[in-house]
Amino acid sequence: MRPSRTFFHTVALSLVISAASFAATAANAADKISIMVGGYEKQIYLPAKLAESLGYFKDEGLEVELLNESAGVDAENQLLAGAVQGVVGFYDHCVDLQAKGKFIKSVVQFSQAPGEVELVSAKYPDIKSFADLKGKRAGVTGLGSSTNFLTLYMASKAGLSPADVTPVPVGAGQTFIAAMQQDAIQVGMTTEPTISRLLKTGEAKVLVDLRTLKGTEKALGGTYPAASLYMDAAWVDAHKEEVQKLANAFVKTLRFIHTHSAAEIADKMPKDFYVGDKDGYIKALDAGKEMFTADGVMPEDGPKTVLAVLSQFSKNVKGKTIDLSKTYTTEFVKNVK
């Protein structure tokens, strides 16, 4: 009998250990949060990779997977499909999606200015303002993207109709640069470090600068909350503990940005983000740091500016009533100590 009992106990113990191991694995899987970033090499989305580099996610006990997607509109689709739990992208997606009956909200607002620049090819010295863009092709990250709406809005303010300018989806980085070099686009909206690369070679010049608050207010009529961490509202309500931890990590990152030099921040970023020009990367970051909020709080007048832009050029938003209070929350960032 003893051998049988020993065998039974051994099998039982093995089952208990296996069950415990499975439970632990399942728990770890449940703790993993996937965040899609609309191009994490872009300086406008710098807080995502910086938070990871500084170890702030791990400090909060989170396992965060950062995934890269160059176009914000595609990152949005990944969130809606349930493939990721959050997106680091432009806040305006939260407004646009509400018009479709999808409730997404910004839980940490990274920036109060787009961080974008409208560049014009050096081949077209006659283009001195948006009023000169009639009949021209304008590069945007993707059709229906934030850069698409902003381009059309500024063209409208210059007296042009949507038909006067042709948006061309060219992404960012090397694909954007190639499109301008090959004259596939004559102007285009992009971010750092792509901006500095084209300015350094003399292949482009700045038409409109949305990297600073002053430039943004002049061009768009107010602050323009852009880069943010946005998530499905229902997921946020069901996972408040995890969202608070994410807010803790990102607000600490924003504080780091405001209390450290561009050079110190650059040292924490992957070397390939410099694209072979660390000095240029640091110079661009130093010039654009102003775009980031210091506390992750939504600028008070910002959502109205975004709605004004989308109401004109988003087919989803035009003519719809949008409850802006449901497009963002300050609940979590204001709890960060």
Image (tube, rainbow, N blue to C red):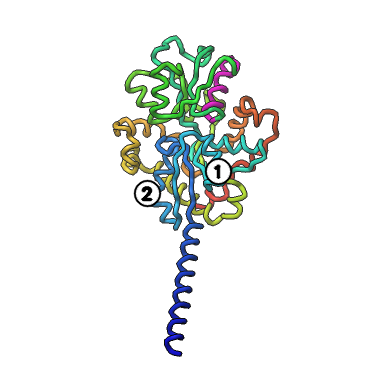
User: For the magenta stretch, what is the residue range?
Assistant: 145-161
Q: Dot 1, crowdedness within 10 Å: few (<14), some or many (≥20)?
A: many
Query: What x and y, as percent, mark residue 202?
Result: 34, 18
Q: Is residue 216 above or below residue 234?
A: above
Q: In the image, which disc is placed on residue 160?
A: none
Q: Secondary structure at mark 2?
A: loop
State the residue position of label 1.
79
The N terminus lies in quadrant? bottom left
Circle 2: residue type: Leu
Q: Is residue 322 above or below residue 243?
A: above
Front in this rendered view, residue 5 or 228: 5
Is 151 included in the stretch rendered in magenta?
A: yes
Q: Dot 2, crowdedness within 10 Å: few (<14), some or many (≥20)?
A: some
Front in this rendered view, residue 258 or 138: 138
- The answer to whether mark 2 and mark 1 are in CB contact below 8 A is no
Image point (44%, 38%), residue name: 45
Residue at far top of view = 126
Query: What x and y, as percent, mark residue 213?
Result: 48, 30
Front in this rendered view, residue 181 or 249: 181
Image point (39%, 22%), residue name: 178
Image point (56%, 46%), residue name: 82
Is 103 included in the stretch rendered in magenta?
A: no
State the residue position of label 2.
54
Q: Count the marks: how many?
A: 2
The image quadrant that residue 272 belongs to is top left
Q: Secondary structure at mark 1?
A: helix
Query: What x and y, as percent, mark residue 181?
Result: 38, 18
Circle 1: residue type: Leu
